[in-house]
């Protein structure tokens, strides 16, 4: 199954199981790339947020006119921060942003319970590494990438250039099928 990529300079489509890495400085406008990725050619999508709460993700989807009826959000922050959590079918929580096993398990459950063209947005790997450590974050990403292949889904993963050592950045670049470099001026370079 092929998916439309919808990124300037990239291939028109990518096969199921493809992993896409969005590498960016912290000041870049990642929301546009992220929401464009989720809008196109999608039956259901999961947003794994280690950077913002479910409420903020919902506001972003609404602002960029993404169909929220297709969305499920995994909020990793609200429980730890003590925010109120509204139980809904389309919002799930883990106990803390360093709960990598919980994040992987919730991802697996989402992929197993949805059919059709499935996308995932992971915002962000950098924040996960901040909370859980580089090694744990890398292991969680690897497990999620394997799940994408198993379920013929595609995923976009955010990674900041300003936090990780160069060898960590290169390790991620080598592991992903498509790498999108987003510059501070919002220009895009795609390697596939």
Image: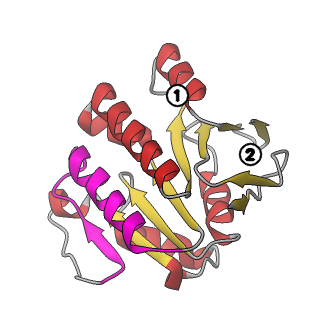
For disc 1, the marked residue is 172
Q: Residue at x 19, y 52 (%)?
A: 96
Q: Helix or strand or loop: what does disc 1 sit on?
A: helix
Q: Residue furthest top?
A: 167
Disc 1 crowd, CA 10 A, few/some/many (<14, 14-19, 20+): some
Q: Quadrant of residue 105?
A: bottom left
Q: Is residue 163 above or below residue 37?
A: above
Q: Residue at x 22, y 47 (%)?
A: 101
Q: Is residue 116 above or below residue 122?
A: below
Measured as percent of width and height from the top left, residue 148 is found at 49, 52
Measured as percent of width and height from the top left, residue 12 is found at 83, 54
- Is residue 106 found inside the magenta-colored segment of the image? yes
- Disc 1 to disc 2: CB gap under 8 Å: no
Q: If the image is split into quadrants, where does the C terminus sit?
A: top right
Measured as percent of width and height from the top left, residue 39 is found at 66, 71
- Is residue 186 found inside the magenta-colored segment of the image? no
Q: CA distance from mark 1 to mark 2?
A: 21 Å
Q: Helix or strand or loop: what does disc 2 sit on?
A: loop
Q: Residue at x 28, y 70 (%)?
A: 92
Q: If the image is split into quadrants, where does the N terminus sit?
A: bottom right
Which mark lies nearer to you, 1 or 2?
Answer: 1
Mark with earlier residue (1, 2): 1
| Left or right, 12 with reference to 79 | right
For disc 2, the marked residue is 186
Q: Is residue 69 above or below residue 6?
A: below
Q: Quadrant of residue 153?
A: bottom right
């Amino acid at each position: 199954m092929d998916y439309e990529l919808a990124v300037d300079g990239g291939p028109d489509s990518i096969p199921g199981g493809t992993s896409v890495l969005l590498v960016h400085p912290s000041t870049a406008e990642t929301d546009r790339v992220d929401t464009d990725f989720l809008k196109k050619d999608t039956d259901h999508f999961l947003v794994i947020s280690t950077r913002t709460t479910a409420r903020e993700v919902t506001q972003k989807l609404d602002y960029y006119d993404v169909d929220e009826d297709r969305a499920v959000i995994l909020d990793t922050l609200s429980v730890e921060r003590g925010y109120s959590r509204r139980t809904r079918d389309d919002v799930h929580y883990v106990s803390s942003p360093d709960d990598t096993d919980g994040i992987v398990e919730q991802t697996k459950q989402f992929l197993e319970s949805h059919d059709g063209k499935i996308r995932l947005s992971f915002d962000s790997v950098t924040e996960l590494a901040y909370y859980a450590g580089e090694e744990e974050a890398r292991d969680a990403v690897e497990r999620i990438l394997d799940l994408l292949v198993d379920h013929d889904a595609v995923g976009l993963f955010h990674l900041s250039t300003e936090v990780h050592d160069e060898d960590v950045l290169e390790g991620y670049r080598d592991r992903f099928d498509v790498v999108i470099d987003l510059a501070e001026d919002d220009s895009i370079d795609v390697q596939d």
